[in-house]
Image (spheres, helix red, strand yellow):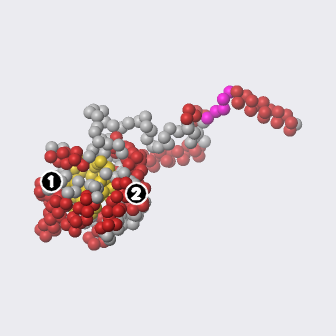
């Protein structure tokens, strides 16, 4: 990459600094934990999407999404694993840092991966600090209800906001026997209510409700003062979150029932790649207009040198 006035590429990213996707209207303000709580009080819907790299983070942030989640789902969407259990703290931090550079206004939440908080509370606090200090996350997310309440209080005591996550908790996939809707029996509903209240009393910034019948998530949302963010939990939640790759058809799998696809990036990318390949094979790319040329003086001098070399060969 050439810098200064002779720069070939500006920024080198998918989105250039001169391009902004921010909706026209009132200027945006930085979204904070208190701002999210105010949205619940005023019954303003809360929007959240995942992002895993700089480009997607900029797109999501500039579209005025309230919260950006660097989910451990990146184990599947970005790294090709079968579930979320394999991703490490170091891998998560790598992606959180990239997203941090792309997010300016949204509240940035980072998942704490499996194994980073289950073993020891001191280690959990240390890892939470790393996500905020090294990664730039403003909130860390921890899965589990009542059994995580004391741990969550310890992390909050370390000046780090925490998001709760109950219902279908992907890090418990082996215990649950797969990705199944939770809270379908009276006993399960009672446990979810206890979990939600425990997280609310622990002081979480918000509670993600995943894979829960809408009737149950509606009860939870009405019961707790903490904002609830649903994914497969119905419209009664205070906000909704979806996976970036899911809404764009980039997951290479059948979508879950709750996923709504808003675009087909897979087809767009595939067509673009195929067109590039065809242009290269046919010699249509690059064209003369897409090529750099020598200045006239240099070209004239080079032609003279080449002419002398040809003359010497005769």
277 relative position to 149: left or right: right
Position of residue 25 in the picture relative to residue 201 (left or right): right
Quadrant of the image containing the C terminus: top right
Residue 45 on image: x %, y %: 20, 46
Seen in the picture, residue 66 relative to 232 is either above or below; the reply is above
Q: Secondary structure at mark 2?
A: helix
Query: Could you tell me which secondary element the residue under label 1 belongs to?
Result: loop
Residue drawn at x 25%, y 58% is: 156
At 78% from the left edge and 30% from the top edge, which residue is drawn?
304
89 shown above or below 96: below
Circle 1 Cα neighbour tier, 10 Å, few/some/many (<14 / 14–19 / ≥20): some
Q: Residues within 10 Å of mark 2 (few under 14, many from 20)?
A: many
Query: Residue 52 location, x and y as percent?
Result: 38, 52
The quarter of the image holding the N terminus is top right
Residue 28 seen in this snapshot: yes
Spot the residue most to the right: 314
Label 2 with label 1: CB-CB less than 8 Å: no
Picture residue at 73% right of the left edge, 28% below the top: 300
Q: Quadrant of residue 31?
A: top left
Please tell me whether residue 167 belongs to the stretch shown in magenta.
no
Residue at the outermost front position: 158
Residue range (magenta): 292-296
Residue closer to the observer: 166 or 235? 166
As measured in the structure, the alpha-carbon distance from the residue carrying label 2 to the one carrying label 1 is 30 Å
Our reading of the magenta stretch's main secondary structure is loop
Q: Earlier in the sequence, mark 2 or mark 1?
A: 2
Q: Name the residue nearer the viewer: 33 or 24.
A: 33
Residue identified by numbered label 2: 93
In percent of width and height, residue 229 lies at 22, 53
Picture disc at residue 225: 1
Q: Residue at x 27, y 32 (%)?
A: 25
């Amino acid at each position: 990459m050439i810098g200064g006035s002779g720069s070939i590429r500006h920024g080198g990213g998918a989105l250039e600094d001169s391009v902004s996707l921010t909706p026209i209207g009132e200027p945006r303000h930085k979204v904070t934990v208190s701002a999210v709580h105010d949205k619940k009080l005023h019954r303003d819907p809360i929007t959240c999407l995942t992002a895993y790299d700089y480009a997607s983070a900029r797109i999501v942030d500039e579209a005025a999404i309230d919260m950006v989640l660097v989910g451990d789902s990146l184990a599947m969407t970005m790294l090709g694993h079968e579930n979320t259990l394999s991703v490490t703290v170091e891998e998560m931090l790598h992606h959180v840092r990239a997203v941090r550079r792309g997010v300016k206004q949204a509240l940035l939440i980072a998942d704490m991966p499996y194994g980073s908080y289950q073993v020891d509370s001191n280690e959990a606090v240390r890892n939470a600090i790393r996500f905020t200090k090294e990664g730039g996350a403003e909130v860390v997310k921890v899965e589990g209800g009542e059994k995580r309440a004391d741990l969550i209080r310890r992390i909050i005591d370390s000046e780090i906001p925490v998001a709760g996550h109950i219902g279908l908790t992907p890090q418990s996939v082996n215990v649950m026997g797969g990705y199944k809707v939770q809270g379908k029996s009276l006993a399960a509903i009672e446990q979810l209510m206890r979990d939600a209240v425990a997280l609310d009393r622990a002081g979480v910034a918000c509670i993600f409700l995943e894979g829960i019948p809408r009737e149950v998530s509606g009860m939870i949302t009405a019961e707790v003062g903490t904002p609830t963010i649903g994914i497969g939990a119905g419209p009664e939640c205070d906000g909704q979150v979806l996976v970036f790759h899911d809404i764009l058809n980039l997951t290479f799998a059948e979508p879950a029932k709750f996923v709504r696809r808003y675009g087909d990036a897979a087809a767009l990318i595939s067509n673009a790649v195929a067109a590039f390949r065809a242009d290269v094979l046919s010699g249509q790319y690059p064209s003369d207009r897409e090529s750099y040329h020598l200045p006239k003086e240099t070209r004239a001098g080079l032609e003279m040198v080449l002419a002398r070399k040809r003359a010497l060969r005769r």
